[in-house]
Image (cartoon, rainbow, N blue to C red):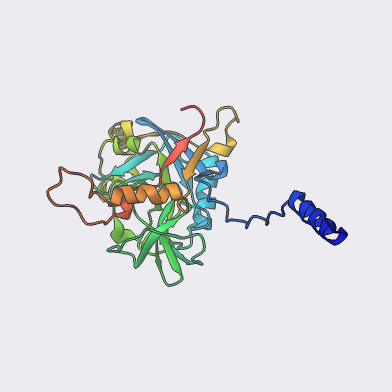
Amino acid sequence: MTRAILLSALALAACANAPVAVPEAIPTAAAEPEWRAVDPENLIVLELATGTTYIELFPEAAPAHVAQIRQLVRDGFYDGEAFYRVIEGHVAQAGREFEQEITGIPTLPFEAERAVSAEGFTPHGNADLFAPEPGHRMGFAVGREGGQEWLLNCPGALGMARDTPPESGSTEIFIPLQPRRYLDRNYTIFGRVIAGMEHVHRLPRVDPATEEEAAALYGDDPELAYQLSQWRRAKLDANFITSAKVAADMPEDERPVFEVMNTASAEWAALKESKRDYSAIDAFVSTPPKVLDICTLPVPARRENGG
């Protein structure tokens, strides 16, 4: 073998034994987390005669409402009050039934809708009778039109009752028992029940006091007023709120910890599709259209400790 051939062979051998350069992996987008933690500052624990209900507030949608309700809860405003208006197929309304009891509490700006970017919005995936574009934000059912967005009056939503003027709400909260979508954009929604909605459904149905009863309660006859107040309290006995607390104010070892499914996740997309497509059910004579009413599938929440 000539010297030139020998050198060439040695060079080839060195190349064969050299480490092979591996191209750097192309970074992929991180998968969306399947669940998100509920901020204890936004978690209200409502102890009812029928059981414990947990409500998540949504300050991004209605900051003034959330701030005032959070403070009222901390002040003990709702402790010992009642769901005094529980109408079958409509809403459960709570607070202080008579306007004389809320004198001096500031009224709130109308926050039923807001201008917001589409970032963070997850489209629902099919048409809706009330919203041009339904979907979810942070687990809350919302509607969109252009750049405007509002929370929907689905069962379990937390809204603010008011008088006729839009900016007259202050303390009286309501929870729809059934979809009340005609209320969308007309009343401010600022939270939703994430656990314990069955306890709201179990509240005895009751009509609010009549105008005549209210007038007598605050009239010039103290004996009649006392009798009416006792009668009213007995009527609401099973509808009282034992206590309302902000979870962040509870001792850490007693504080409920919740997570809500992320509506930008693959898990939520799969869950929606499973509720939209019934083509695999052999017993169906007629396969339903692939349509899912946004109010029939609330975004799941789960408790991570106790309870």
Rendered position, 181 above or below 220: below
Depth check: give the residue in front, 146 or 281.
281
Q: Residue at x 60, y 31 (%)?
A: 252
Residue at 43% x, 64% y: name it: 149
Percent of width and height locating residue 141: 40, 55
Report x, y in % for residue 262.
48, 49
Q: Nearer the viewer, residue 216 or 194?
A: 194
Find residue 165 and report its horizontal and vertical position in percent.
39, 64
> Which residue is pictured at 50% across the width and 40% down the height?
259
Q: How many marks?
A: 0
User: Which residue is the extreme one toward the right?
Assistant: 3
Q: Which quadrant of the structure image shows residue 290?
A: bottom left
- Which residue, as the protein is rendered here, is positioned at the far bottom? 146
Please tell me whether residue 56 is drawn above or below residue 245 in the rendered image.
Answer: below
Residue 178: image location, x then y, percent: 27, 48
**In this orientation, does residue 99 appear?**
no
Q: 269 or 258, which lies in front?
A: 269
In this rendering, would 141 be left or right of 68? left
Q: Is residue 193 visible?
A: yes
Q: Residue furthest front?
A: 1
Quick one: 216 or 1, which is closer to the camera?
1
Position of 118 with respect to 219 (left or right) is right
Locate residue 83 relative to residue 190 in the image: left or right. Answer: left
In terms of image quadrants, where is residue 113?
bottom left
Please state, as top left, top right, bottom left or bottom right, where the N terminus lies in the image: bottom right
